[in-house]
Image: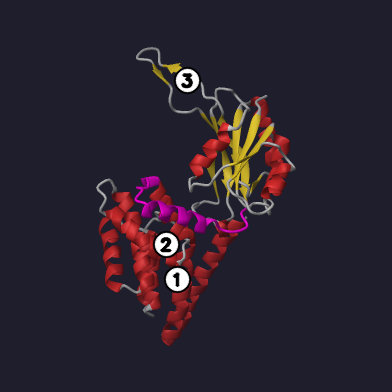
């Protein structure tokens, strides 16, 4: 049987930490907790489960904190957990079974990460596979019978284990602060991080978050290293910021740049919202239909799903009030889209 270290970085998590540790403590052989500056009772809660509690001065870098935490572990494998995670009884049994049969050549195990829909910030899926269990010391192995080379890609096992992500609130404000501070300091964020920034804006951003982000995404467009996908994401952020500010010329400029390359559901929704706010419900419905039926989302999955369906129901209700001669037909369409929306919501909750 392999041994497993539960490894966590925490800050002000006293409300959820015990829930997490109660579920994982029976499954692991060591618990390592790194505190990045709690001012509540987090460390007191942690002390009920382990004496391996370390302080790490927060420098606005989660990778640095996790690397420090990993350096304090001693077991064969490391399970990297967040305080708002937990594992239920059924999946705990799968976790223990995995420990019994784990092939020591496996260097990484992916588990299903099950998200709370209402508090997602970067995840478009209700559940997705994520690397969660890592071999602490990696062995390098020569491969190929001729022109041999060292295997660099990790051996990954996709398990059936589900980890429940159950935050009490959104962490988007914390993430936006890190993004903006790095960009203001002149750091160049990777394409991956800029994609995460744009996704988080569309899932959880406020108007002011979009205003603050817009200059950074406009700079990205003119960066020679920015590819077409990066520009498409930037156009979405800039169009939303311009619409919220009421900057009509800029709004249509960014929308048209997107449409001239590859129309996406997010831009179609932006145009739909623009015309809906202008009380041109017929034109709004055209763009929401395009969002739902003709295009794909690149940042927010709901931009091709629940968002346009909900707005189409609203458009047809408005059109029913404006056109008495077509009232029955429009209301029928509204009812149809409401039923579709309820069906989508039921699929999420089931």
- Circle 1 residue: 312
Q: Does 162 sit above or below residue 178?
A: above
Which SS class for mark 3?
Answer: loop
Give how far across and how far down residue 149 sits, in percent: 39, 18
Question: Residue at (63%, 53%) from the top-left corner?
Answer: 39
Quick check: is 177 in the magenta stretch? yes
Report helix, strand or loop for mark 1: helix
Of residues 145 and 289, which is closer to you in this image?
A: 145
The span picked out in magenta is: 166-192
Relative side of 195 to 125, left or right: left
* CB atoms of marks 2 and 3 within 8 Å: no
Residue 248 rendering spot, x and y as whole percentages: 30, 73
Q: Which of the two labelled residues, at mark 1 and mark 2, occupies the earlier sequence position? A: 2
Mark 2–mark 3 Cα distance, whole angstroms, equals: 48 Å
Residue at the image position 37 percent from the left and 45 percent from the top: 190
Mark 3 vs mark 1: in front: 3
What is the number of callouts on the image? 3
Q: Is residue 291 above or below residue 45?
A: below
User: Few, some or many C-alpha atoms within 10 Å of disc 2 (few <14, some 14-19, many ≥20)?
Assistant: many
Are the residues tagged 3 and 1 within 8 Å (C-beta)? no
Residue drawn at x 70%, y 48% is 19
Q: Are marks 1 and 2 in contact (CB under 8 Å)?
A: yes
Above or below: residue 134 compared with residue 167: above
Tell which circle, 3 or 1, labels the residue nearer the N-terminal end: 3
Residue with the mark numbered 2: 292
- State the CA–CA distance, disc 3 to disc 1: 56 Å
* Residue at the spot of label 3: 140
In the displayed structure, 208 sits above or below 99; it is below
Query: Picture coordinates of residue 199 (x, y %)?
Result: 43, 55
Image quarter of the N terminus: top right
Extreme-top residue of the structure: 145
Counting residues from the N terminus, which is met first, the one under dot 2 or under dot 3?
Answer: 3
């Amino acid at each position: 049987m392999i041994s497993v270290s539960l490894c966590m970085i925490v800050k002000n998590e006293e409300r959820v930490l015990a829930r997490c540790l109660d579920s994982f403590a029976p499954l692991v052989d060591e618990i390592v907790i790194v505190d990045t500056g709690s001012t509540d009772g987090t460390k007191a809660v942690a002390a009920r489960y382990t004496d391996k509690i370390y302080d790490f001065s927060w420098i606005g870098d989660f990778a640095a904190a996790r690397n420090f935490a990993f350096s304090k572990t001693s077991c064969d494998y490391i399970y990297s957990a967040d305080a708002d995670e937990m594992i239920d009884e059924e999946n705990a049994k799968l976790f223990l079974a995995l420990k019994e049969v784990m092939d020591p050549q496996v260097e990484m195990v992916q588990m299903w990460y099950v998200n709370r829909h209402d508090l997602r910030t970067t995840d478009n899926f209700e559940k997705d596979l994520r690397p969660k269990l890592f071999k602490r010391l990696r062995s390098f192995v020569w491969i190929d019978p001729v022109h041999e080379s060292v295997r660099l890609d990790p051996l990954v096992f996709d398990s059936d284990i589900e980890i429940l992500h159950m935050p009490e609130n959104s962490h988007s404000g914390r993430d936006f602060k890190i993004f903006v501070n790095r960009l203001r300091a002149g750091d160049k964020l990777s394409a991956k991080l800029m994609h995460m920034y744009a996704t988080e804006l569309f899932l959880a951003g406020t108007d002011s978050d979009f205003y603050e982000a817009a200059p950074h995404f406009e700079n990205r467009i003119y960066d020679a290293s920015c590819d077409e996908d990066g520009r498409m994401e930037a156009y979405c952020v800039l169009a939303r910021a311009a619409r919220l500010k009421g900057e009509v010329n800029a709004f249509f400029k960014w929308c048209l740049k997107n449409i001239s390359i590859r129309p996406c559901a997010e831009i179609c929704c932006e145009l739909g919202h623009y015309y809906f706010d202008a009380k041109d419900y017929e034109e709004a419905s055209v763009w929401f239909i395009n969002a739902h039926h003709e295009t794909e989302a690149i940042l927010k999955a709901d931009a091709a799903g629940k968002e346009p369906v909900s707005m189409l129901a609203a458009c047809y209700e408005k059109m029913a009030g404006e056109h008495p001669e077509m009232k029955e037909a429009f209301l029928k369409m509204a009812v149809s889209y409401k039923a579709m929306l309820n069906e989508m919501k039921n699929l999420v909750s089931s």
